[in-house]
Amino acid sequence: MKIEPLTLDKFIRVEKRVFFMRRLIVLILVLSSLFSLFTTINSLSYVISCHIVDLPPGYFECIYQYVNNGLYVVYYSTAPVYFAVQTVSGYTAFSTQGTSYYGYISLPEGEYKVLFVNNMTDSNVTIQVYLGDGRPYPTGIADYGIDASNGVARPYVEKFNGVVGVAQVYSISAYNASINSYGASLQLNTVLQVNTVQGSQEYWLQNVVQFSTNTSQYRVVDNVWNYTSYPSVLNSSAITGEGTVASTLEGTHLNYYYVYSTNWFNTTYPLYTALLIKVATVPQGVRVVFSYLNGTSFTDYDNVTIKVGGVTSAYLLVDGYNTTGSGNAYDTELVFGGECNGEITQFDQINATIYMFYLNNTGVLTPKSLSPFGLDTAEASDNLFTVPYQGAYNVEVGNGNELVIANKSFPFDVGLVNGSKVIDLGQRADVELDVRGGVPPYLVEIGNETFIDLFVGNTYYSFLPNGTGDLTYPITVEDLYGNTKSLDYSLRVNPDPTVSLSVPRNDTDVGLPITLTPNVRGGTPPYNETWYVNGVQVPANGAFNFSSPGTYNLTLKVVDSVGYAVEKSVTVEVYKDPSLTVSTNQTVTDQGVPIGLNITGYYGVPPYTVKVYVNGTLENASVTQTGVRVPLDLAPGVYSVEVKLTDSAGYQVDKTVILRFNQDPTLAVNEVAQGSFFVTATSVTISGGAYQGTPPYTYTVYVNGNKYYNGNDLSLSVPLSLGKNNITVVVKDSSGVSITRTILVYSGYDWADIAALIAVVIIASLVLIFLKKRRR
């Protein structure tokens, strides 16, 4: 899992080499956010009892304690006293004397008397006693305000405004067979001291990660309990936040508490997290902010206001001299236990590293002394123990009876595990460091960037180089106490990759592919190219075929070998393929009578280029528009005329027509005149016809300028007038070509025949006269 530290410059501006603790406290106190609602219950319980005993000279105090698995004892007194553990029957199982004692006393199960006798001084003695009935306990680290070392227990007081509990959970599995629960919890708990003009109040604050170990989920829960007295008393008018006030029954006592929870989150191990509680006075009383680490920043998931009047001061308190009004210890704990409701659970597996530190207005504090068990947390475990580890503490499955975690120092060490070797400018470089020992948290400076590393061990740092070429960056790591380690990190930074697209045009037709030519420069070869059409990845190498018209966004995403990605897009308009119509006024004509080609283009990408080929030979110059008439006047013959239309995208369509050009028509006219006895020509018979040209033919006959006949057949008799007759025959073929022939026919009297007739008449008359005379 990649673990990243907090980036200091995300939240505040910090100049280098400013004192580390002040930077850390300012950073953590300024982060804020909110999360969603869910409720849970964590109840009060007295796992380890606290007693304050005042004894006059010669008096004793007997505390009855039932022991399941040995007895933990811590006491200190203002003067030497006699201390003993006895059976109920009076057998002394353990005894000592002095002003303090801490340790584990192995005892069989049963009821015992814990006896303190003031028989060593003539003055009154005050004794502070902590008694624990062996396991189970909430296990982790806890600060009681008692420095137990070298055989002496010394109380101390620590005041602070915030506490941070850090946890690296590599694995966790728990099961409580009695309630069939797989739950567990990690709790950061502390005491809030509120001082007012009327007196003091105490509150138990809990910031908890609840685990569902069988479903690999977790959520974050907060609780606020009133430790001013017992039982806990709270009402909704006295406390506000995202949560609500609930109650739980403990024995015969009803305890009221405030509770809020986030939703459940999925858990990925290792889980690196931190819990934060911070307090401040506000006009209404005291503001308590509960936060958890979400990635690289803290999320303030609940802002709680405890309404208290007349507040003079408020702070978190560890105090080994006193107990709260409810009789609880002033301790701060970061411990594992059952999930909720005072549950005691069995851990099947756990591998976790934890530590905590305090925040005040001047810097960061570490606990002076730590114990492995919490005093006030209700939820517990019966098979965990705590050991120091590299400046923090490991919590593991097992048994241990130590009452105090021994102070153990670990050498502060920093190692470069891995790092980016080659990146592009504008790309962040990843550096993995192994930082351990010393006193966490750590301040890490790489180049001009500063990080807060809360975690022990391997952590990834991401920083932005500020140049290109072969670069070396100094890395400085400082622990909480100012110990420093330095090393160098080298890498190569290439210029960022750029990509351009060369496209022949931004429009095309459906049936015409378009090819984009990419040009990639810079970055770190080799490159991986991925094409997208309207956001959908397609298998393409820059050539695209489209099945339908529309507007298409073509995108090339280029990722170089170090993962730097750049994109370039172009928009292409795809049109319906062009079509062509070619029409003619006729397909057959005579020489000299042109045929007009009507050419029209549709769709595609205008403008168009049109070419006309006659029997394969280009007939005319290109026509760059459609909807025009192209006249053709060709020699006699039959022609294949091909029209090719090309739109501006290069898509071509063609049409072919067959045209025939004939020779001009000719006219043959025959005439035969008919006459009478007295008239030479009374009519004329006309016959003949047209040849060549373009049938059908139309004949028109004019006689002396007057239309006499119009028809498709030239076979007719034309009457004549006496005198000169001008007969004109006009033939017109279907192409409109006309041929004219004129015939002159004369019509008159036949004087020879008339003279002969007169002669015959005269002769006949004379003969008749002669004959009549003879009869007489």
Image (tube, helix red, strand yellow):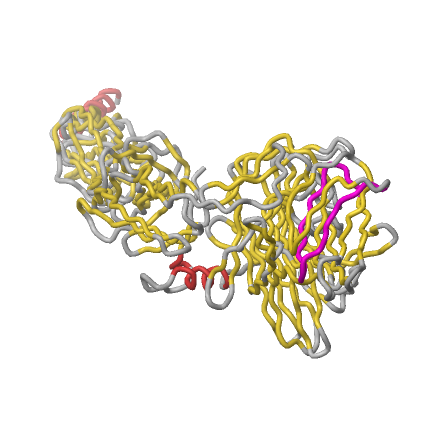
Residue 238 drawn above or below residue 60: below
Q: In which quarter of the image is the N terminus?
A: top left
Q: Nearer the viewer, residue 176 or 312?
A: 312
Q: Which of 509 and 296 is in front in this view?
A: 296
Residue 751 drawn above or below residue 630: above
The answer to whether one can see residue 629 in this image is no
The answer to whether one can see residue 550 in this image is yes
- The x, y position of residue 92, in whole percent, is 77, 41
Q: Which of 251 and 327 is in front in this view?
A: 327
Q: Which residue is drawn at 53% across and 59% down?
A: 358
Is 233 placed left or right of 740 in the picture? right
Q: Which of 206 and 305 is in front in this view?
A: 206
Magenta stretch: includes residue 70: yes
Q: Is the magenta stretch mostly helix, strand or loop?
A: strand
Q: Which residue is drawn at 40% across and 56% down?
A: 481
Q: Quadrant of the C terminus?
A: top left
Q: Residue at x 22, y 40 (%)?
A: 520
Q: Which residue is drawn at 63% across and 40% down?
A: 211
- The x, y position of residue 508, in whole percent, is 29, 39
Is 564 placed left or right of 730 in the picture? right
How many marks are shown on the rendered structure?
A: 0
- The x, y position of residue 93, in whole percent, is 75, 39
**Magenta-colored span:** 66-88
Residue 60 drawn above or below residue 488: below
Q: In terms of image quadrants, where is residue 565?
A: top left
Q: In terms of image quadrants, where is residue 638?
A: top left
